[in-house]
Amino acid sequence: MLVDLWPQYGLTISTPRLELRLPREEELAELAHLAGRGVHRADERPFLTPWTDGSPEDRARFVLQGHWGGLGGWSVSAWRLGLGAFHDGNPLGVVTLRARDFLVVGEVTTSAWLGIEHQGKGYGTEARIGLLTLAFDHLGANAALTEVFQDNHSSQGVSRKLGYEHDGISVDARGDEAVVSDRLRLTREKWSQQKRPAVTVDGMAACRPMFGL
């Protein structure tokens, strides 16, 4: 079976409303089409990824390439775990946990996108808590990082609510505009102080060698 060769397919993170796991082939296609329909309004640009460029098919194929690239490029020293977020079996978006030299550095980075019709319902926060539970409680991370545009108020709010603290800035090109992002850091100590919903993680034991644990 596929899960015997790639045990991440048996990894499931369950929050009160969501299930986070690797999508199967047809579910991946649904997620790709969801992104093709939009992950933010056309007059916004809250991410470096140009989600409004090209056709819906172009954006859908971008999701496929990102997913396959994360699986195909996996190594203990540099891994990217992109999980589908599902509510009652319906795909909502993709949440990603990634790290480089994790066994030495002990830090992870999170990112996410949700279909525009699923935003504003608290799913993003709940999915982030699921990823952070995996990172801190099962992988033993020391810190979780994220970078957020200063004008991306919703994502800023989620991070601050979860205990992230300011850790500097970065400057990137967004088209022909230079934009400033806040670097935010959540430490293990801050994570342990957070009140959060119950999260269960199944299938991690078989995955530990894939993370070098």
Image: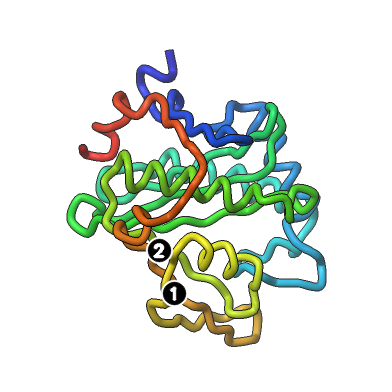
Residue type indicated by callout 1 = Arg
Q: Are marks 1 and 2 in contact (CB under 8 Å)?
A: yes
Who is closer to the viewer here, 83 or 156? 156
x, y percentage for residue 76? 26, 43
Residue type indicated by callout 2 = Leu
Query: Does 16 appear above or below 167?
Result: above
Displayed quadrant of residue 152: bottom right
Residue 154 seen by the camera: yes
Q: Is residue 83 left or right of residue 40?
A: left
Question: Residue at left 60%, top 39%?
Answer: 85
Displayed quadrant of residue 15: top right
x, y percentage for residue 56? 79, 51
Question: Residue at left 66%, top 51%?
Answer: 122
What color scheme is it? rainbow
Residue closest to the far left: 104
Q: Is residue 134 left or right of residue 125?
A: left
Instruction: Say which label, 1 or 2, has the lower sequence index.
Output: 2
Name the residue carrying label 1: 183
Question: Residue at left 74%, top 64%?
Answer: 53
Query: Does 172 appear above or below 54?
Result: below
> Badge 2 local density, few (<14 within 10 Å), some, or many (20+)?
many
x, y percentage for residue 207? 32, 30
Who is closer to the viewer here, 16 or 65? 16
Query: Does 120 appear above or below 153?
Result: above
Q: Cα distance, mark 1 to mark 2? A: 7 Å
Per the rendering, the mark at residue 102 is none
Name the residue carrying label 2: 145
> Badge 1 local density, few (<14 within 10 Å), some, or many (20+)?
some
Q: Secondary structure at mark 1?
A: strand
Query: Does 196 appear above or below 26?
Result: below
